[in-house]
Image (cartoon, helix red, strand yellow):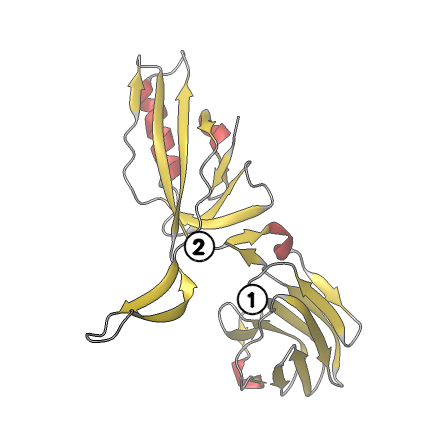
Amino acid sequence: MGVVIFNGKPSLDYGIQVEHPPEYQTPAKDYEVIHIPGRNGDLVIDNGSYQNVSRQYQIAFGNLDKDFTGMANAVAEWLHSASGYARLEDSYEPEYYRMAMFQDEAAVENILQHAGRAAISFNCKPQRFLKSGEESIQMSVNGSVLRNPTGFSSLPKITVFGSGKSRLTVGDCVIEIANVSGSIVLDSAIQDAYKGATNRNSDVTATSGFPELKPGENTISWGNGITYVEVVPRWWTI
């Protein structure tokens, strides 16, 4: 029996059973296709991104001591428990999670007033995030190498520890830090530098943008003033 966890709430808490494993769907590449009259073949512009995918489950629930309407209401509350995207996990791909939202209606079949069956579909961002990419990796040796196990560049959260002015290099990305001041977080996903609730963007100069961890090996090095860094790599695939 499969388990789905949406917005931190497992399907088992609602008496839901997943009847069939979901299909694995790959996202469509975000291409812009332009036809130019008089030219053979279309012009294709790669926007460098992917479109959302659906994650569908066939579910069933039932209890002789409960009525259909009450159980169906509980399932609906679970599906609509999040506003916008929330974390989606299941037992079929336990090493990954997705960011998903439930936005469609769900037609629930009434089975003899004490059971129900439905097909539910989550609208997911194209990435499958590796749970291993949520783990913080401490790097205390200058020039250490961090290997990205996927074929896609990730947007890490890097916490720099030290004091004074320094420079951080991640692959070919160089970031000048005017004052580490104990620690500073460089969050590539939101393109922001901060410490706690304090914005620290004024202390950072990133002429080539915030760092990415490219597929394969990434060398992380730093100048005087930095003692070590911690990296949450946020690995993902499709």
> Where 13 sits versus 90, above or below?
above
| Location of residue 204 with respect to 33 vertically, above or below | below
* 51 and 87: which is toward the camera: 51
Crowd band around label 2 with a 10 angstrom C-alpha radius: few (<14), some (14–19), many (20+): many
Residue found at the far left of this picture: 37
Q: Mark 1: which amino acid? A: Ser
Q: Residues within 10 Å of mark 1 (few under 14, many from 20)?
A: some
Q: Nearer the viewer, residue 2 or 190?
A: 2
Which kind of residue does numbered mark 2 sit on?
Pro
Q: Horizontal placement of 19 versus 217: left or right?
A: left
Q: Secondary structure at mark 1?
A: loop
Give the quadrant of residue 155: bottom right
Q: Is residue 52 visible?
A: yes
Q: Residue at x 54, y 56 (%)?
A: 237
The image quadrant that residue 119 belongs to is top left
Left or right placement of residue 167 versus residue 117 in this view: right
Judging from the image, what secondary structure is the residue with disc 2 in? loop
Front residue of this view, candidates 11 and 196: 11
Residue 142 location, quadrant: bottom right
Q: Is residue 37 left or right of residue 226?
A: left
Residue depicted at 42% across the width and 64% down the height = 49
Give the left or right position of residue 37, taking residue 129 as reference: left
- Say which label, 2 or 1, has the lower sequence index: 2
Estimate the spatial distance between the alpha carbons at disc 2 and disc 1, rounded to whole Å: 14 Å
Q: Which mark is residue 126?
A: 2
What x and y, as percent, mark residue 110?
Answer: 29, 19
**Residue 207: image location, x then y, percent:** 53, 86
Name the residue tied to disc 1: 153
